[in-house]
Image (cartoon, grey):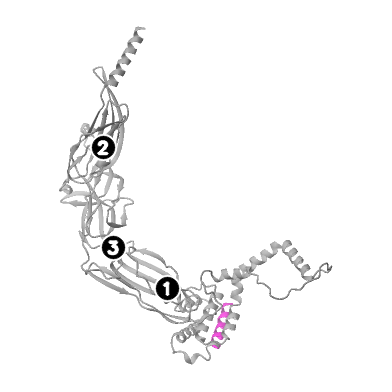
Amino acid sequence: MIKKINKSIFLLLLFFSFSLSQTIVNASVDANRISQNETLGFKIVATNADATPTVDISPILKDFKIISGPAQQTNIQWINGSMTSSRSLTWTLLAKKGGKINIPSLNVNVEKNIFRTNPIGITVDKGAGRAQMANLFIEAKADKEQAYPGEQITVTYRLFTRLNLSIEDIEYPKSIGFWNEDLRAAQSVRFNNTKINGIDYKVATLYKSALFPTKSGNLVIAPMTAICNVEIPSREKLKNPFNEAFFNSMFRETQRQFIQSDSINIKVVKYPISPPSDFSGAVGKFEISSMVDTPVVKINEAITFKVKLKGTGNLNQFNINSINFPQNMEVFPPTSSFKRNEFRDDITGEQNFEYILIPRISGKFILEPISLTYFDPTIDKFITARSKSVPLIINPGNTKDIASTKFNKEYVSLLGDDIRHIKISTPSLYSKGAKSIPIWVWTSYLIAATLFIFPATISKFKDNRLSTFSQRQSKRALKIAINQLLKRSNDPFALTSNVIYKYFQSKLFLSSENLDPLMIESVLQDYISKSLLKEVLYLMKVCDAGRFGPDANIQISSLQQESIDILKKIDKALA
């Protein structure tokens, strides 16, 4: 009974002593002087607190970067019969700059009470000459210290080490005021041997990027941070009586280290003269060209207008000037693609734009040249590059062709099958109560019954018709070509050329894109004799000469008949 009373009194005294103790909050660091690549341990301890403290750490983010934390810990100690408790929060910090830095006073909340910590002064050594002394560091190097807006700056980050290590994590820099293009990010780090002032190092490229300034002024390229696990000799090595590699490897331990490169200052100067009014921000060296997929079409037939922009510089960061197309052409928004040369550090590549044009009237037209004004930083001048003009011949077409490009021809054909036009003729009427049933009623019922009973047969017939369409078209290719060649035309050369290409397209199952004499030659050379191939190629060249010049006028009388004879020979050879 006495033991129980003593125990209760002891616990009661313990409670009162604990509740009457005063809460104290302190802040501390594990070192007041560090190098720029060393981390700093920062701890806030609340003594005699019943709850874990909370703190706003944002005021220190201006000068320090949080690597890890906060880590929580609770300790209880008995000293000379009295108990003390503490609850702590710990962070691992990395200084963003060198020199003298203060960790400011922070507000700490403990059980609805607010405490303020003491400010702490830190000295961060910039590490001058560390390349000769340090065992591990990251070098950040830019290919230029001054640039124009939009000019490429290539920055390389390399890791130098004299220790065995493994890279745990890399935080790539994010610089303000620059457009960034990755050139090389380390997938697997490969080290090479090098020397700095006679000292052996292993070096590996961690990252390479192309930065393009977006404004003028003094800009800063942010540093890179890496976390490495470094092998260092263990304290147990001191007890190792053997001095051999095998035993040395047994007495090693891994230490986690945080390293950071220096930041780089870049001076971005303004252009030497005011940019021209049509300057859209292109900086480098560029060429521009334009072309169409076919220079001769009919009204309402589509033309693909291609613009190619290639060169070295800030590609993909500016727009080409607007293009003035003829008013009688319908123009659709362009599609674009970009292909970069991956084997060059300077951003080099090719950007393509494709416009779909639909001519609405016939005639001869010229697509005007496209200009691009760019700044060449190697000669400090603005230069204007221009493409060549593109001629177009729009031949008259069928006025019943589709005049709007909302729907393609196949879709309009389907619409035609669905539309049932209103009959304007007087219908046949029958008097009410007549017993005779018209024959068309019996026929309708019979057809309906047939469709109901034999749907599978009809579906199979349709599938067979669709699957053999290309073969049937190939067999009828010669007949269709002869019928078209027998027609009269104001331009027999264009007619003959179109008929020949359509014949080969149907006969040989070719795509209608990019059909030309070279394409026909490559396809036919294994199927017909050389003399016959020579005849058909000569005929196609005559057609081209007649379409675009006066050189073949003497052939106009016999052109279509000669074409019929040659196509018959080819069809016989391909049978």
Name the residue at 57% across, 80% down: 571
Q: Which residue is mark 1?
A: 305
| Dot placed on the residue nearer the N-terminal end, 2 or 3 | 2
**Residue 102 sits in quarter:** top left
The reply, left or right, for residue 513 in relation to residue 269 is right
Image disc number at residue 252: 2
Residue situated furthest top in the rendering:
1
Name the residue at 23% across, 17% down: 80
Find the magenta span and give its range: 561-575
The reply, left or right, for residue 402 in relation to residue 341 is right
| Dot placed on the residue nearer the N-terminal end, 3 or 1 | 1
Q: Secondary structure at mark 2?
A: strand
| Dot placed on the residue nearer the N-terminal end, 1 or 2 | 2
**Residue 292 sits in quarter:** bottom left
Q: CA distance from mark 1 to mark 2?
A: 68 Å
Where does the image place residue 469, in percent across and percent down from the top left? Answer: 61, 71
Q: Nearer the viewer, mark 3 or mark 1?
A: 1
Where does the image place residue 111, in percent across and percent down from the top left? Answer: 31, 29
In this rendering, the count of numbered labels is 3
Image disc number at residue 346: 3
Q: Nearer the viewer, residue 471 or 288?
A: 288
Where does the image place residue 253, in percent across and percent down from the top left? Answer: 27, 37
Residue situated furthest front in the rendering:
432
**Amino acid marked by disc 3:** Asp
Query: What is the crowding at mark 2: few (fewer than 14 residues within 10 Å), some, or many (at least 20)?
Result: some
**Residue 356 sits in quarter:** bottom left
Where does the image place residue 203, in percent across and percent down from the top left? Answer: 24, 51
**Amino acid marked by disc 2:** Arg
Query: What is the crowding at mark 1: few (fewer than 14 residues within 10 Å), some, or many (at least 20)?
Result: many
Q: CA distance from mark 3 to mark 1?
A: 29 Å
Q: Nearer the viewer, residue 368 or 514?
A: 368
Q: Secondary structure at mark 3?
A: loop
